[in-house]
Image (tube, grey):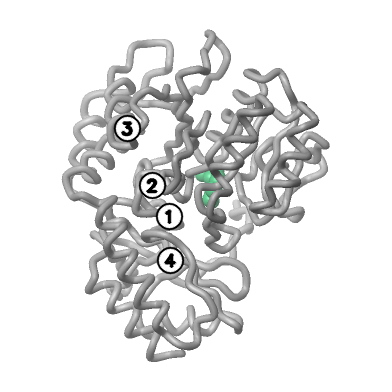
């Protein structure tokens, strides 16, 4: 059987990871500034992560959500405390798209409405309701097309209000910082005003923190740079450091009923062990603070380099936009300097390193970049 060929692949086979580095099968060592697409939060193969996962596997690997799983409650408590959302409720799933699907469904259940507003350059996943609110017609199949999805220009409050005034909108979904669209931080005041409008028209505000959450922005959630308190927050990526897990954080005003949402694998023992290990490491190693400190340092240094059109982002979620295509720069970074980076469109390099990045490693990247632009 052949693999279904949907990914353009780099000709590299990682066989080992440790901290912020990975090694290929020829023993070449690479600095990982891509974090496996914003997934590696606490570094590769962290000893505490490995021992927590191994211990759990040695006890019990899986049972369904029909029994007591105390690790879920432990995770809810720890996540509530570290994220500053102790009064929210937690629904555990397996991926980012699934978290957003459930968020949209909840908004619709709560309001009795059908429409969802999202924004240009936004990405919310590839499944049915969330791909419809993703601004990329190439990945929307005819079966996903729906008039319930409204995509507005980012940061445009006037058009948002006009849409909300119809009283047909269940939820507004916004990325804490737009990731795939090229690292765009919401304009000053936009989230606060959007929250105000949502409240005024009885619409739920959903913050998609799947890429920008879990410390990446230098705060636990990127929207915490503002005073906004979303009705629903979605997370995944960095949550399990590579173990597939996602979650919906739900404000206390939203009341559940049995059967409202459900999942077979969501919240399984291993997902909880991975998620708890990540939070424990983030807490003991002060990784949110590290993302803020090293990220601010990196952004400042990058802004001093002539030849980069614009440096955008917060913490360790950074976009470098160039006037030219970035294929050659990324190729040399990888092949000559052994540095992994991400991409967004033809002109933007995306940095999504583990939250454990050090200033020395940031300097290594800066020197490499300076040498080739
Ligand atoms: C902001 C955002 N939302 C949702 C998703 C979808 O997550 P997943 O690929 O885990 O379904 C992504 C993935 O890149 C994302 O960046």
Query: Residue at the location (37% across, 30% down)?
Result: 85
First along the sequence among labels 4 and 3: 3
**Nearer the camera: disc 2 or disc 3:** 3
Mark 4: secondary structure: strand
Ligand 1 within 8 Å of the CB at mark 4: no
- Asked if residue 274 lies left or right of residue 246, the reply is left
Give the residue drawn at x 60%, y 59%.
Answer: 181
- The answer to which of marks 2 and 1 sits earlier in the sequence is 1
CB contact under 8 Å: marks 2 and 1: yes
Report which residue position mark 4 lands on: 351
Helix, strand or loop for disc 1: helix
Q: Secondary structure at mark 3?
A: helix
**Can you tell me whether the CB of the residue at mark 1 lies under 8 Å from the nearest atom of ligand 1?**
yes
Residue 76 horizontal/vertical position (percent): 33, 25
Give the camera-side residue of 157 and 348. Answer: 157
Mark 2 crowd level (few <14, some 14–19, many ≥20, 10 Å Cα): many
- Provide the residue designation for mark 1: 38
Q: Is residue 180 above or below residue 302?
A: above
Name the residue: 42% across, 11% down.
66
Q: Which residue is mark 3?
A: 79
Q: Label 4 neighbourhood size at 10 Å, few (<14), some (14-19), many (20+)? A: many
> Which is nearer the N-term, disc 3 or disc 1?
1
Location of residue 146 with respect to 3 vertically, above or below: above
Where does label 2 land, which residue?
238
For label 1, the crowd category at 10 Å Cα-Cα, with few meaning under 14, some 14 to 19 and many 20 or more, is many
Task: Give me the C-alpha separation between circle 2 and circle 3.
Answer: 13 Å
C-alpha gap between disc 4 and disc 3: 25 Å
> Could you tell me residue 206's position as x and y percent?
56, 35
Category of crowding for the residue at label 3, using alpha-carbon neighbours closer than 10 angstroms: few (below 14), some (14–19), many (at least 20): many
Q: Indicate which disc residue 336 carries.
A: none
Q: Earlier in the sequence, mark 2 or mark 3?
A: 3
């Amino acid at each position: 059987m052949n693999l279904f060929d949907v990914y353009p692949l780099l000709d590299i086979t990682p066989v080992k990871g440790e901290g912020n580095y990975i090694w290929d099968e020829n023993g070449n060592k690479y600095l990982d500034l891509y974090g496996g697409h914003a997934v590696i939060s606490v570094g590769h193969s962290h000893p505490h992560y490995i021992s927590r996962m191994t211990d759990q596997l040695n006890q019990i690997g899986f049972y369904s959500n029909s029994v007591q799983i105390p690790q879920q409650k432990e995770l809810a408590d720890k996540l509530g405390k570290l994220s500053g959302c102790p009064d929210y409720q937690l629904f555990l799933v397996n991926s980012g798209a699934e978290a957003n699907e459930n968020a949209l469904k909840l908004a619709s259940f709560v309001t009795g409405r059908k429409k969802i507003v999202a924004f240009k350059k936004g990405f919310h996943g590839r499944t049915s309701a969330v791909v419809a609110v993703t601004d990329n017609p190439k990945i929307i199949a005819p079966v996903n097309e729906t008039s319930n999805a409204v995509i507005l220009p980012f940061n445009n409050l006037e058009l948002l209000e006009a849409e909300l005034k119809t009283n047909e909108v269940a939820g507004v979904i916004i990325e804490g910082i737009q990731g795939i669209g090229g690292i765009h931080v919401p304009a000053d005041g936009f989230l606060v005003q959007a929250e105000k409008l949502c409240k005024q028209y009885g619409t739920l505000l959903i913050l998609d923190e799947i890429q920008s959450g879990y410390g990446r922005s230098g705060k636990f959630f990127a929207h915490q740079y503002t005073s906004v308190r979303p009705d629903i927050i979605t997370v995944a990526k960095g949550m399990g450091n590579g173990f597939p897990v996602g979650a919906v954080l739900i404000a206390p005003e939203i009341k559940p009923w049995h059967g409202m949402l459900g999942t077979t694998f969501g919240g399984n023992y291993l997902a909880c062990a991975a998620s708890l290990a990540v939070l424990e490491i983030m807490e003991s190693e002060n990784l949110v603070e590290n993302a803020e400190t090293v990220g601010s340092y990196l952004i400042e240094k990058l802004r001093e380099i002539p030849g980069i059109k614009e440096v955008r982002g917060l913490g360790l979620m950074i976009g470098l936009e160039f006037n030219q295509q970035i294929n050659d720069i990324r190729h040399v970074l990888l092949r000559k300097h052994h540095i992994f980076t991400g991409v967004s469109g033809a002109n933007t390099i995306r940095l999504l390193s583990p939250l454990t990045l050090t200033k020395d490693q940031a300097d290594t990247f800066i020197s490499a970049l300076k040498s080739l632009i």
